[in-house]
Image: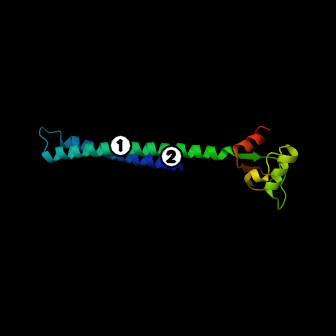
């Protein structure tokens, strides 16, 4: 999403800059004479003000896009802090993944501190074509996630 937004912004910026450059060239040709008409001088002043406004707006949009992108990245990092991927757990039909994960934590890893109530979300990733799919486990607290991670 952010790359589309940035690309759209760059396209808009390039279009505005090319049109402003073309307009500047036309103004220079018209005002190349000794005494440009008063209307042209006023038009040139208005154009300079407009150009300054557009460049300021483009700079502001660019800054906003950058801030949105950074905010999105930070949000994604925070959301992934509580996520674990568990590999190598065999699949069974009609399995109840919270129970499966709790059994893995208690029986295989001997982590009784982390129970079913600490698991917020868990589901398998991908398609069940070959082999057991990894299980994504989102744990409510970072502390419990660290217990599993640093086991």
Q: Report whether 23 appears left or right of 108.
A: left
User: In the image shown, does 146 or 34 lie closer to the viewer?
Assistant: 146
Q: Residue furthest bottom?
A: 94
Q: Looking at this view, name the residue that lies furthest to the right.
A: 107
Of residue 13 and residue 92, the one placed in the foreground of this image is: 92
| Residue 17 shows up from this direction | no
Which of the image's four quarters has the C terminus?
top right
| Residue bearing mark 1 | 56
Q: Secondary structure at mark 1?
A: helix
Element class at badge 2: helix
**Which corner quadrant of the image does residue 28 belong to?**
top left
Question: Percent position (x, y) of residue 105?
Answer: 83, 46
Q: Is residue 64 visible?
A: yes
Q: Residue at x 34, y 46 (%)?
A: 54
| Cα distance in 3D space between marks 1 and 2 | 18 Å
* Point 40% across, 44% down: residue: 60
The residue pinned by badge 2 equals 68
Tell me what residue is drawn at x 20 percent, y 47 percent. 43
Label 1 Cα crowd, 10 Å radius (few <14 / some 14-19 / many 20+):
few
Q: Quadrant of residue 47?
A: top left
41, 115: nearer the viewer? 115
Which x, y percent locates residue 13?
A: 39, 45
* Disc 1 and disc 2 in contact, CB within 8 angstroms: no
On residue 140, which mark appears?
Answer: none
Looking at the image, tell me whether mark 1 or mark 2 is earlier in sequence order: 1
Task: List x then y, in percent, for residue 94.
Answer: 82, 62
């Amino acid at each position: 999403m952010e790359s589309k937004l940035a690309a759209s912004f760059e396209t808009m910026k390039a279009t505005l800059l090319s049109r402003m450059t073309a307009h500047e060239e036309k103004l220079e040709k018209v005002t190349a004479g000794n005494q440009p008409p008063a209307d042209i001088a006023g038009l040139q002043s208005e154009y300079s003000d407009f150009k300054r406004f557009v460049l300021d707006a483009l700079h502001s949009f660019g800054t906003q896009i950058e801030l949105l992108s950074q905010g999105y990245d930070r949000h994604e990092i925070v959301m992934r802090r509580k996520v674990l991927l568990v590999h190598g757990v065999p699949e069974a039909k009609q399995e109840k993944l919270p129970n499966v994960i709790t059994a893995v934590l208690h029986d295989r890893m001997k982590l009784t501190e982390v129970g079913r109530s600490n698991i917020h979300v868990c589901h398998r990733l991908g398609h069940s074509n070959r082999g057991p799919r990894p299980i994504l486990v989102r744990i409510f607290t970072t502390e419990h996630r660290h217990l599993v991670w640093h086991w």
